[in-house]
Image (cartoon, rainbow, N blue to C red):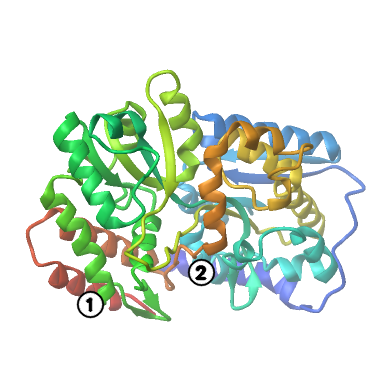
Amino acid sequence: MMKRLMLRLLAAGGLGIVLSNPAAAEMAGPPSKPVTITFYNYNLATATAGAQATRELIAEFEAANPLIKVQPVPVPPNEIITRLQADMAAGRQPDVAQLVFRDLIYLATDLGAQPLEDMAGAKGYAELTAGMIPNGLELGKVDGKTYGLAYTFSTPILYYNADLFRKAGLDPDKPPRTWAEVRTAAEAVAKKTGAEGFFPGAYGPADGTFVYQAILMSNGGKVRDGNRLTYASREGIEAVQMLRDMVAGGGHSRMDPASPADAMSAGKLGMFLYTSALQNSISNAARGKWELRVAPMPAFGTKPTAPTNSGSALFAFSTDPAKQRASYELLKFMTSKRGYTIITSKIGYLPLRLDIVDDPNYLGPWTAANPLIRPNLEQLSRLTPNVAFPGPDYRQVESLMKDAVIEAVFGRGDVARILTEAQTRGQAMMP
């Protein structure tokens, strides 16, 4: 409690510099002398193409802005909030951070993230966001102001192994479009090929609940309505019961939730519903061994799907005018046409500037050579927020929900009872 109070006081002190004059003029001008800013980034903490591409982005930015030095702070995604809290409590003010949307409300209300409209001014904010997809920008707003600038996005897509489909007597040119078709195909793969049929990345272990939320909302349910939890609604129970029935039928694998990406890459899983951010790595693993294809996330009959965003936003925490301007320039470059050309082609996230997709000067050649991105781009038109929870206990509330879904899908208890009891416990932690 004392630590939380200290952080709130620190945040309030920082915010006061900005909010004391919310109608302030535009930002300070470009740096006239050297300035160093920190960049807390979880892509840099991985041994993947994401780290290499992020280093390339930072190097290009520094070359174009010789007076700005970016000090990278690589932190794994499941540790980055704790690291920010610790550094703030120790008086080390972060400048820019790559963070996930599940933390959005907490960052805006408790950790002192700067509203970009106030930090950049009207003209600067317009220049920063011009050309970005509007529904992506909306996801980073709290009470009408942008605290998280949309950065690396993906949506759940259905990866499927065309070779296993053929072995199971299925037509890989006609992938499942509904959950009923997924169940039929999954059971065929499991029974006729010896491989696992299907698994959704809806159960963790450390990636939040965005896939589960997409399934729930595609059936017309909602995670919460304001401060009232609603995932144990009729629609929510139906969605989880559908997954339970797939497990009972043998099509939905009982594998460890940490294993499906590896199983898919090894050609031992028929279908995998998960973030499109893995598309590059799974494609590389499949090349020359088996044929990877992708399809949009499945629907509940004729209901429209509600693909959630997974990925991150960029948050600015600086209160010093010179560092704010340098942070603004970094945000602007990382989300520029050039920035998204590198992010999409070398990491696999979606370009949030759709005008570069077929532009020969940017992503055009890459898109032509990688048509698997098309289903994911189409889902951007229906992009749905990965719902964040309010209050200081927001992660415990989310964990209760996720644990209940796991118990309901893989256990033997009544689905409605399990979800309702978890929702009641979680509600007691809500503001």
Q: Is residue 386 above or below residue 377?
A: below
Let me know if residue 364 appears in the view: yes
The location of residue 308, given as percent across then percent down, is 46, 59
The location of residue 283, given as percent across then percent down, is 46, 29
The location of residue 423, given as percent across then percent down, is 25, 73
Task: Give the residue type at disc 2.
Answer: Ile
Q: Residue at x 51, y 48 (%)?
A: 375
Give the class, few, some or many, for how many residues have Cα within 10 Å of label 1's Cα (few <14, many ≥20): few
Screen quadrant of the N terminus: bottom left
Screen quadrant of the C terminus: bottom left
Q: Residue at x 70, y 49 (%)?
A: 335
Checking the image for residue 271, the label placed there is: none
Q: Residue at x 22, y 57 (%)?
A: 243
Residue at image mark 1:
424
Residue at image mark 2:
105
The location of residue 66, given as percent across then percent down, is 86, 37
Q: Secondary structure at mark 1?
A: helix
Give the class, few, some or many, for how many residues have Cα within 10 Å of label 2's Cα (few <14, many ≥20): many
